[in-house]
Amino acid sequence: MTTIAADFEAGIMVSDSRCSAGATWYPMTKVHRVGNELIGIAGAVKDGHRWLKWYTAGKKGPHPKIEDFVALVLRADGLYDVSSDGLELRVERGKHAIGSGGSAALAVMLAGHDAKMAVDIACQVDTGSGGDVIVYKVTA
C-alpha cells in the first residue's frame, strides 16, 4: 500500500510514508537514492528490499525471485518502470505513479498538477497511503 509519483521533467519523485502492519501502520522510507538515481519501491516490503539489495550491488548474480513488487527509477536519461521480473521500461510521457494510490496520483499529474499534489490527493482517497508526503530531487 503506497503512492509514489515521479516527474522526469521536474526531476522529482514523491512518496507517502505509510507502511501498513495489520491493524496499524508506521512511517517508512519508500524512495532510495542510489548514486544519481531515485528509486521508489511499492509492493511487499521484503520483495522490494531484496530487489534493492541486488540492484545496489550492481545487479550481480541472478535476479531475485520476487512476486509483489514494482519500482520507479528516475535517472538523468529518463523515468523507468521496473516490474517484478526485472524488466525496465522507459516511461515515454515522463510522468508515472505506482502503488495502491498510483492511478489516482497519475490522474492528478495528467490533469496538469505536480507530483506532490498528486500524492497529497491520492493519500486522501487511497486508504493504503498516508503519513508524511516526501519530495526527493534528482541530483546532477
Image (cartoon, grey):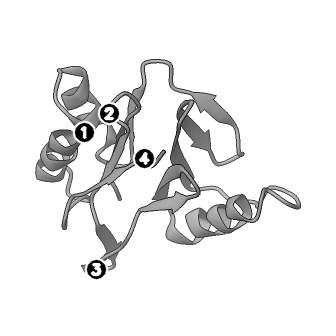
Residue type for callout 1: Ala
Left or right: where does residue 67 sit relative to residue 80? right
Q: Which residue is mark 2?
A: 10
Farthest-out residue, right: 61
Spatial CA span between label 2 and label 3: 29 Å
| Residue 68 rendering spot, x and y as whole percentages | 56, 56
Q: Secondary structure at mark 4?
A: loop
| Residue 4 seen in the current view | no
Q: Earlier in the sequence, mark 2 or mark 3?
A: 2
> Is 128 left or right of 40, judged from the image as shown?
left
Disc 1 secondary structure class: helix
Is the residue 104 above or below the residue 69 in the image?
above
Q: Residues within 10 Å of mark 1 (few under 14, many from 20)?
A: many
Q: Is residue 10 left or right of residue 73?
A: left
Q: Which residue is mark 4?
A: 138
CB contact under 8 Å: marks 4 and 2: no
Q: CA distance from mark 3 to mark 1?
A: 23 Å
Measure the alpha-carbon separation of dots 3 and 4: 26 Å
Identify residue type, mark 2: Ala
| Crowding at mark 2 (Cα within 10 Å: few <14, some 14-19, many 20+) | few
x and y, in percent, of residue 75 in the image: 54, 40
Disc 2 on helix, strand or loop?
loop
Q: Find disc 1 in the rendering and name its residue.
A: 115
The residue that mark 3 highlights is 26
- Amino acid type shown at disc 3: Tyr
Q: Quadrant of residue 93?
A: top left
Residue depth check, mark 4 versus mark 1: number of the one nearer the observer: 4
Please report whichever mark, 1 or 2, sits nearer to the chain's N-terminal start: 2
Q: Which is closer to the viewer, label 2 or label 3? A: 2
